[in-house]
Structures are given as C-alpha cells and as structure tokens.
C-alpha cells in the first residue's frame, strides 16, 4: 500500500485517538457571547498506519508525546523544519526490525572489498539514471552511458564527479548555476527535494534493520545519515525530474511556495521501475534497502536500484 505524505504548513494541534492522528486547526469564529471563547476547532483524522512521512513546517505546531509514540512505532519519518522552512531534523525509531542486532552485526562486519563493490554498483546506477533523464530531455548523453559502464571498484577514478559536471551543465541551463547548497535557484528546489528523499531513505534503512549512520562510502564523523546519503544517490534523478517540471511550468521558483513544496513532496509516490516492475518510490526504496541487507549477510551480491526509463 502506498503510504501518505502529510505536510503541515499552518498552525495545528496534533494528537491521537483510536490509532488515528487527530489534526486540529484553530480558526476564527463568529462573534460569541462573552465568556464562551474566541476560537473554534476544525478537526480532521488520518489513520496512522496509512502514513509514511510527515513534514512539520510551521513554528506554531504542537504535537503530543502519545502521537509521537504511535508514529515512531509505525516507522513514520517525521521531519521538522527550521524558521526558514527547510527540513533540519528527522525522528526515527531506535528499533526498526525484529532482527536488528543481527543485522547491525552484518552491517558492521561488512568487508572493505564488499563496500567498494556496493559503491561501484551505486555510482554506476546513479550515472545511468542521470543519463536516462538527459535522454528524456533530448540531450545527447552517450558519454554518460559509457562512464556508467566504466565505474571501477570504489569508483577509484571518480566517474561520479566527471558525470556530475556534464550532467548539471546540460540539465540546468540557468545562468551562473552550479550545484550547491547555497547556490542560485533551482538549488533551493533541489535542496528541499533531496532532504525529503533522504528522510525516505533513512526510514527504509531503519525498517530493514540497519544503521543509517554507517555508510558504504560516506564516512563524515559529523553526518548521522551516511548510509542514507549513499543509497539515495541513484534516486536523485527522480527529484531532478520533478524540479525540471517545476522550472518548466512555474512562472517563478525563487521562493518555495506551498504549491511547489507539494510537488516536491510527491517524490514519495511517483512510479519508478525496479526489478522489472513499477512501484511507488517509497516502496522501491524498501526493496533497495532489503537487497542491501542481503548483500551484507552474504545471501546476495547485487543491490536492487530503480532504472530510469
């Protein structure tokens, strides 16, 4: 079943009753006699089991600990945003799988050659998916397809960087554009979309019983989501696809409007092709992380990644 993504951009009080999230919005009421209150509540409910991701953007949102408990037990990725409306935090369960201890051991004991091979697969898949998006846009990308096949163990020759330069120069033709956290738009769109994708990836990793902190390539000691940053790489072009659509259809994208954010949040439910079948991206991500666990335990040698077609 496709899990829902809930976005809260207005003040709200979030609680729980009967395994539902209860959403109460304060709204102005008609004039009432003195002493009978000044506001009334508009209330909605959503089944917690149907939720995959929640984004809390407004600074005036209140959430009960009882609801936090139920969201955590249902492996909901809860993302909170800063005063500038950008995602900054992710709440995930401490225990996401019944075999977690054993799976942690397999992950920790993974050999260096195995991790280099997994990174080779990851970068090859990322470059092929980038080439797929360029091809869809009518941009010649034979170089990208060749580079994808030439990626060596651990990407020792850094084909990822070479492909990235070609990819961004041809995909985004905005003047003075370079891909970076603080660059000119559409970097703001990419930053937001990747933050949501990162949360989806971390959720799937925890659900598969692994630590999102221990990466196969990323290893920055200040990064709590190294493995998520690894595994999300081949999925990035699907965010780029949405960003390209926004650039083509919106008059302006200098600011992240509610409508633009809704489009970026749709990343969780867009269809991708994985292992010969179409699946919502959130479902595909779970298949990817499950296949990663199988590689760590030695029952498989290949990570399942989506193919951009």
Image: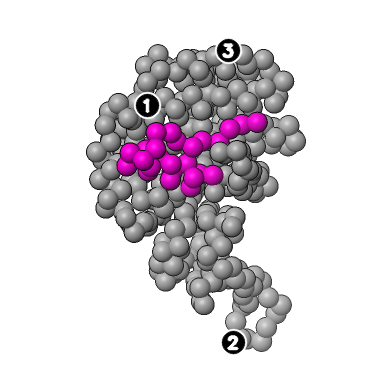
Q: x and y percent of residue 194 in the render?
A: 52, 38
- Gap between marks 1 and 3, in whole Å? 22 Å
Q: x and y percent of residue 76 in the render?
A: 47, 58
Residue 192, visible in the rendered structure? no
Q: Secondary structure at mark 3?
A: helix
164 left or right, relative to 89: right
Check contact, mark 1 vs mark 3: CB within 8 A: no
Q: Residue at x 30, y 26 (%)?
A: 113
Of labels 3 and 2, earlier in sequence is 2
The residue segment tinted magenta is 284-309
Dividing the image into 4 quarters, which one contains the N terminus?
A: bottom right
Dividing the image into 4 quarters, which one contains the C terminus?
A: top right
Q: Residue furthest front?
A: 299
* Above or below: residue 72 compared with residue 309: below
Q: Residues within 10 Å of mark 1 (few under 14, many from 20)?
A: some
Check contact, mark 3 vs mark 2: CB within 8 A: no
Name the residue tied to disc 1.
117
Query: Which residue is nearer to you in this view: 292 or 219?
Result: 292
* Above or below: residue 81 compared with residue 238: below
Q: Which mark is residue 143?
A: 3
Query: Which residue is nearer to you in this view: 54 or 93?
Result: 93
Query: Which residue is nearer to you in this view: 251 or 163?
Result: 163
Q: How is the image coloured?
A: one colour
Q: Which mark is residue 106?
A: none
Q: x and y percent of residue 198 in the render?
A: 47, 42
Of labels 1 and 2, earlier in sequence is 2
Q: Residue at x 47, y 15 (%)?
A: 150
Q: Residues within 10 Å of mark 2 (few under 14, many from 20)?
A: few
Q: Nearer the viewer, mark 1 or mark 3?
A: 1
Q: Residue at x 61, y 31 (%)?
A: 308
* Above or below: residue 122 compared with residue 48: above
267 left or right, relative to 109: right
């Amino acid at each position: 079943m496709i899990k829902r993504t809930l976005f809260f951009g207005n003040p709200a009080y979030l609680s729980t009753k009967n395994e539902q999230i209860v959403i109460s919005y304060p709204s102005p009421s008609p004039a009432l006699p003195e002493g009978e209150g000044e506001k009334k509540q508009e209330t909605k409910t959503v089944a917690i089991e149907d939720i995959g991701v929640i984004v809390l953007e407004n600074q005036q949102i209140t959430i009960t600990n009882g609801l936090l408990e139920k969201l955590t037990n249902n492996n909901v990725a809860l993302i909170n945003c800063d005063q500038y409306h950008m995602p900054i935090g992710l709440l995930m369960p401490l225990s996401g799988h019944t075999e977690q201890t054993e799976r942690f051991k397999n992950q920790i004991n993974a050999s260096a050659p195995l991790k280099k091979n997994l990174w080779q697969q990851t970068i090859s898949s990322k470059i092929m998916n980038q080439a797929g998006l360029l091809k869809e846009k009518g941009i010649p990308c034979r170089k990208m397809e060749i580079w994808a096949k030439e990626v060596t163990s651990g990407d020792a020759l850094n084909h990822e960087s070479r492909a990235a330069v070609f990819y961004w120069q041809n995909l985004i033709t905005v003047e003075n554009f370079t891909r970076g956290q603080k660059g000119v738009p559409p970097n703001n769109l990419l930053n937001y979309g990747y933050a949501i994708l990162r949360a989806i990836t971390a959720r799937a990793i925890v659900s598969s019983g692994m630590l999102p902190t221990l990466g196969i390539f990323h290893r920055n000691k200040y990064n709590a989501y190294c493995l998520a940053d690894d595994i999300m790489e081949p999925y990035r072009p699907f965010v780029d696809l949405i960003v390209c659509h926004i650039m083509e259809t919106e008059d302006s994208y200098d600011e992240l409007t509610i409508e633009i954010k809704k489009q970026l949040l749709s990343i969780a439910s867009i269809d991708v092709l994985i292992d010969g079948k179409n699946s919502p991206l959130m479902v595909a991500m779970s298949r990817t992380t499950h296949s990663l666990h199988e590689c760590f335990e030695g029952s498989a040698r290949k990570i399942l990644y989506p193919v951009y077609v």
